[in-house]
Image (cartoon, rainbow, N blue to C red):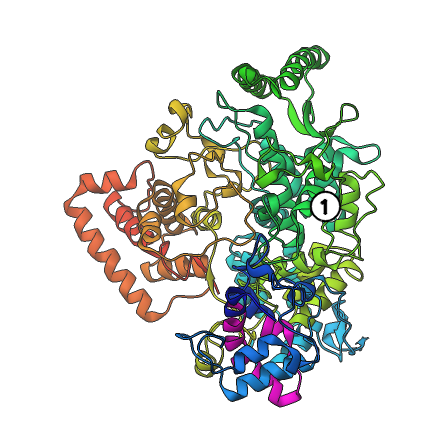
Amino acid sequence: MTLCKSCLCIFTCALVLMSNHVFAQAQSDGEIRFEEDIRPILTEHCASCHGGVKKQGGFSVLSRSLLLAETDSGQPAVVPADAESSELLRRVRSSDPGDQMPPQGHDRLSPQEIRDLEHWIQQGVTWPEHWAYQPLSKTTAQLTSDDGDASSIGQPLIDGINPVDWFVHKKLAQQKLQPSEQAGRRILLRRLSLDLTGLNPLPEELKSFEENELPDAFISQVDRLLASPHFGERWARHWLDEARYADSEGYEKDSVKNDAWRFRDWVIRAINDDMPFDEFTRRQIAGDLLPDATDDDRIATQFHLQAQFNLEGGVDAEEDRTKRVIDRVGTVSSVWLGSSLACCQCHDHPYDSFRQRDFYAMYAFFNNADFAADFLGDVPANADKLREERKAKWSKIADLLRRQVDDKNLSDDVQSQLSSLRSYDNSKGFTRYLTERKTDKRKTWVFTRGDFLQPDQAQGDVAPNVPSVLPGAFDDTVDRNRLDLAEWLVSTENPLTARVEVNKVWMHLFGQALTDQPQEFGSRGSAPSHPELLDFLASWFMHEGGWSRKKLIRLIVSSETWRQSSVVRPELIAHDPNNHFLARQNRFRVEAEIVRDLSLQVSGLLTDEIGGPSVFPPLPSIIAEQTYAGSFKFKASEGSDRYRRGLYTFFRRTAIDPNLSTFDCPDSSLTSAQRDRSNNPLQALAALHNEVFHEAAQAFSVRLLTEGESAPESSAIIDRALVLTTGRHAYEMEKEQLLELQQAARIHYMSHPKDAVALCGQYTTDRVSQPELAAWIATMRIVLNMDEFLTRS
């Protein structure tokens, strides 16, 4: 038998590393666990050369069948349950430099590692289905209820405790770790308020909760915050990151979309109304195809219109359309399936068992979707006339689009007309939405190497379908549409969607997900830290929870696990530095929009109005000047609009507010379930010097000096400032340091009155002189820049 040296070298090198991982498990129970011990090794060390489009030597490690298939030599490298007949094992044992594997220059397998390899082969080369695609696991523990505190708040129980705690404590016991004590009440309420609304609790709310000794005190706070209209704002921001929401089309021209905010407001309403996630899915994927579709259903389909739209001259409109369809496939597969299907546009997946044809089967669901427009909000008196005008414009464009597919000389004309139509829609108040072609339907072909100009018609056209490796693939003989896709996504027969969504909800409540990469559940992603817990929550979410986001959050935050202190205990630093086993809560900086919201909130400037068109907070002129031909005629909003929450800030892809980008806000070019969380000097400088934060310090100082019937003592001002910003009273050392700073600043501004006037700006109060006010402004700028203020503990 002759085997390809290249494939044997790569594969056996991976086995060298693999045997180190599997030895302890093989010794303990005689069974090598594929998911934990082998799949990551094959992925990291083999798949780049022996997976997907790369299959050197005719050898692939993407599945058991491929691993055991014939190589280019005509023989398999591994024979299950017959180690002695496996050429791979013979090469590993060989001492012949020209024959041995790994080859010279690489570490040889130890005798025990060779025995491990033999053990695995003799066991039959076990290769279970990937964990994310398996049916949900069934725990042997029975849900019960009793008369204890947990059942009295309406939570499910396992052995009398919250199921989250049951699974986490089980894992901690295995690691000989103890959970942390519960966080203090003020920390707890601030954490809850930040997680659920993105705002600080009021001082009176903190005091009331701290003094409330009733058993349902905490869950009452949970229910209050879940019912807050600000809950929808907070959790809409998470979803809008995934939807790649923006108020502009993208690319260099980056044309404005005056109707984008309607989708943002739809998401806020849906979340506040606790629209079940399955319905939330149906409406965004295929709201226009629902029976008796409403205006809201059509607005929901703007999820797909968040894809970038290139309106620049000379662009091939058909190529740009295919790019938008490709974007939709990649986005839907990432958001709902946690799968990087987008890389199959050109070839089979290099790490997972997705095929290129799977990608185009998903593509076919969106290939006959076009955009339409109507008045899905305020309807003008001359609506019918405007509809007829737009219909005439679109008829001309549709004819050009058909002709341009074959005549590329029409590209400039098409782009000019499309750009003109966008301007018309903006000026007349039209809202765009997705609609399905009923006639002249496009056929879907596999694009050779992803090139839309090279459809592989020899393979035949591709019917709409879901990846064949996933459960519930459709019969190709039946025509399917986006509504069928939506129904499959939320089918209880497809547990992947529930696993993916539950994992992201957990991430927003703990700062880290149960499986580290929320948009990558495939072979490149990590296995969950608590697989039984993930499966329990996914099952509960679909069935007992009725796909309710609020119920799921309520279940998680009412657990002892979520309420733990975030203090790092000494024994955890060595044993579990990354808090993998959840023996404590996590401490992390809040997101970019929340940094600004908190500063405006404590200053008393924040406008709490919900929804409406996007607004324009102050923006450095140089940012607007960077847009295409300086086309962004930016004018800062006035009055209350200047102080709206960051969620409502007009988001132009080529002119991102530096306050957002500095604090890791994504640019909306791609879906993003998990934001980066950096820590750099620019953030401190922005929070200290940026206009909005300085104005917040001005207003905050006036608020502190004027609250109450008489001017408060300096020490009381410091204490009040700390309660408003961090939720706790000031320490004596803090009071001393901040008072020293305030006194030094007062001395400076007493001798530099012009500087005091400049620092105070339009803010004044009769209770203190301008130098005194300026000293407090300088002090409050430091308080608003404290790490604890910008951190969720």
Q: Position of residue 787 (x, y in %)?
A: 38, 60
What residue type is disc 1 on? Thr
Image-quadrant location for residue 451: top right
Q: Which residues are magenta?
A: 10-38
Residue at 66% across, 14% down = 399
The answer to whether one can see residue 450 in this image is yes
Q: Position of residue 161 (x, y in %)?
A: 71, 77
State whether the magenta stretch is mostly helix, strand or loop: helix
Instruction: Using residue 589 as the reference point, say whether residue 93 is left or right of it.
Output: right
Q: Residues within 10 Å of mark 1 (few under 14, many from 20)?
A: many
Asked if residue 28 is among those painted magenta in the image, a careful observer would answer: yes
Asked if residue 667 is among those painted magenta in the image, a careful observer would answer: no
| Residue 163 or residue 460, whichever sits in front | 460
Instruction: Using residue 276 as the reference point, say whether residue 72 is left or right of it.
Output: left
| Residue 13 or residue 396, whichever sits in front | 13
Q: Is residue 142 above or below residue 209?
A: below
Q: Position of residue 293 (x, y in %)?
A: 79, 32
| Residue 750 or residue 104, whichever sits in front | 104
Per the image, label 1 sits on a secondary structure element best described as: helix
Q: Is residue 447 above or below residue 793?
A: above
| Residue 728 or residue 63, whichever sits in front | 63
Q: Is residue 111 above or below residue 354?
A: below
Q: Is residue 119 above or below residue 481?
A: below
Q: Residue furthest front?
A: 1
Residue at 40% across, 29% down = 627
Residue at 70% across, 40% down = 284
The answer to whether one can see residue 175 in this image is no
According to the image, label 1 marks what residue?
281
